[in-house]
Amino acid sequence: MRSAVVMLIAALSCLQESPMKPSETAPGWMKPAAAKLETTLVGKYGESQRARARRGLKQISDFWRAPDGDQAAFEDFVGRNFAGDSAALDVMFNRFEHLLEQAFGHTAEISREFRQQTDLDAGPVLPYDEVFASYDPSAHLTDDFFDNKLAFVVLLNFPLTTLDERLSEGDRWTRRQWAETRLAEYFSRRIPADVNLAISKAGAESGQYISEYNIWMHHLVEERGRRLFPSKMRLLSHWNLRDEIKADYADSENGLAKQRMIAKVMERIVGQTIPASVVDNPQLDWNPYTNEVRPTGEKDSDSAPSGRGATSAPEPDTRYLRLLEDYRASRLADPYSPNAPTLMARRFDEDRQIPEDRARKMFERVLSSPLVPRVAGLIQNRLGRPLEPFDIWYNGFRPKMPYTEAELDALVAKKYPTAEAYEKDIPALLAKLGFPPERAKFLAENITVDPARGSGHAMGAAMRQTKAHLRTRIEKGGMNYKGFNIAVHEMGHNVEQTFSLNTIDYYSLNGVPNTAFTEALAFIFQGHDLELLGLRSPDASAEALKALNDFWATYEICGVSLVDMRVWHWMYGHPRATSEHLRDAVLQISKDVWNVFYAPVFHQRDVVLLGIYSHMIDSFLYLPDYPLGHMIAFQLEEHMRRVGKIGPEFERVARQGRIAPDLWMKGATGSPVGPEALLAAADNALGLVRN
Ligand SMILES: [Zn+2]
């Protein structure tokens, strides 16, 4: 999804040289000048404007720097740009709403056109196409708006609220008040270009480190030289390693030995005792149990010899050096983000808009739920052995599909030979989901379907005069079932995007509170894909298995998220730590979380597997999005199930726009964001799935 928020986040990673240096602070004349201006403004517009004037002056003082102008320029600016009565404020609000929609909308349109060749199945991608695709016309928008002072006009007149204020007072605000605070938020940070450059450099370097962290599986050997994995198998940590553990449940012969070996590899990555020589190296054999390394006799790759000798010398804590560099770069932005002065605050208060403390409590409720030992017992019965730590990735709660993939492929290919065929069918598909004919028609008119080069995605419009784009994969013989399933998901995004932009009352409120919400809405569509093909939907026992699968996955990722959160707090608490200190801290935190929430059901202590996620190294506190996403998806699914018909209810909830997540969820389901729906579904499922 590409909304104004996303674009502003993109704009914040601007690489342009800026005249402002981090050492610059507010000029000394600022405070007395602001006090004098408050008196002048109150004298001119009346006592009723005092609070607004004081707040606005404070807000612009937080961001104004010497190069923006001297005291006279500051006073002149305030005198000319303070809207002192409601009529002037209305004019200003409407003008900014309209013109920002044009700025975000047209830059999004240029981006979409520039990416056309790389995004669509439209012939070869030439070198210059890639340059067009990576160009972001909105990248300098925020900087420009501070330079030409439009950002200061907004900050002088509209309130920049804290998450606390939005949560404690937001349910009494009017829609217009919400729109005003969102308008001001576009300009809540003024991060200098060199700081953004440092952050994106750290992110790029840790991303690069992660993207090359492959394990050559055929070169893992057991004690007597036995190889468990096929030749050429190269797995990226942690995603592919974890997914291989999941796949190995189906291997009744060697599955368990493979899973144990992968868990050992993960343990060595987290603890950095992995020999540096074996990372992404098919020229060496490695026994992860003894840590012995030898030149291989098995050639299963054409890659040139790495030149790294057969030594067990451990990786020199590079994993934690990368994470430390992420932290050091992130910290540079703190002084320029007065409303959210830590990376934790920016992630939770600004991006997710759920306080960290509340998120932690929700995670702990799942982790310490009495359902955990019950589901663990069920898994143990199904496996026929005691649980081992890697069973946090158990994936055996999968319903049997009532149709074969081939049957579904044939059906879909016949129905949708082209992207146009799918586009033409949108009104009928939406009717099946309960949208009245007139709404189905309106939505279809605002969604264009294009053949995607990749698997598919949804690209929302950012202004009302353009359309949302649904990108879906069309194979030579027509769409296949996998493509259809994705297309239905993307259609859910497009419908949300269309309602929350085209039918919204204020542009600044377009969208959803955070990405978990649009994903949850898209999953609701996706869950009905068989019905849309005229087939029967999954039955109650399939639903129950899905609930148990989601519960167990949430239990796993809640712990991983707690580790991620504690590690960031530890780094902020130890600004001078070295990579070795950080390694030891991550190991300790992983063990602590494990010992409290996992050891009681797994009967093993001091396990470090929760520290394996690659996101922890290159994604700057992104992991908590996953458990929140599971909870939000369950809440909305449960709600839609209760209501029965999706159409009108989907429109009602989507039109709430970008208010606070809890308010949005209360408006949608009657309750704030929380794990209750997920826990209730798992409890109910335990009654249906006996063994
Ligand atoms: Zn999605």
Image (tube, helix red, strand yellow):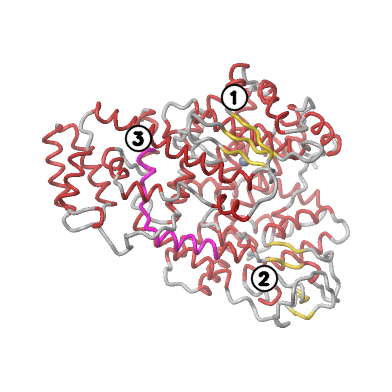
Q: Which residue is mark 1?
A: 445
Q: Is mark 2 within 8 Å of ligand 1?
A: no
Q: Which residue is mark 2?
A: 268
Q: Residues within 10 Å of mark 1 (few under 14, many from 20)?
A: some
Q: How many marks?
A: 3
First-in-chain label (3 vs 2):
3
Disc 3 marks which amino acid? Phe
Point out residue 492 in the picture as x, y percentages from the top left corner: 62, 33
* Magenta span: chief secondary structure: helix
Disc 2 marks which amino acid? Arg
Point out residue 538 in the picture as x, y percentages from the top left corner: 76, 32
Asked if 688 appears above or below 442 in the picture, the reply is: below
Please tell me whether mark 2 or mark 1 is closer to you in this view. Answer: 1
Magenta-colored span: 180-205
| Quadrant in which the C terminus is drawn | top right
Image check: 571 left or right of 38?
right
In the foreground, 629 or 13: 13
Residue at horizontal 53%, vertical 28%?
Answer: 499
Point out residue 574 in the picture as x, y percentages from the top left corner: 43, 68
Disc 1 marks which amino acid? Glu
First-in-chain label (2 vs 1):
2
Element marked by disc 1: helix
Residue 356 shows up from this direction = no
Q: Which residue is mark 3?
A: 96
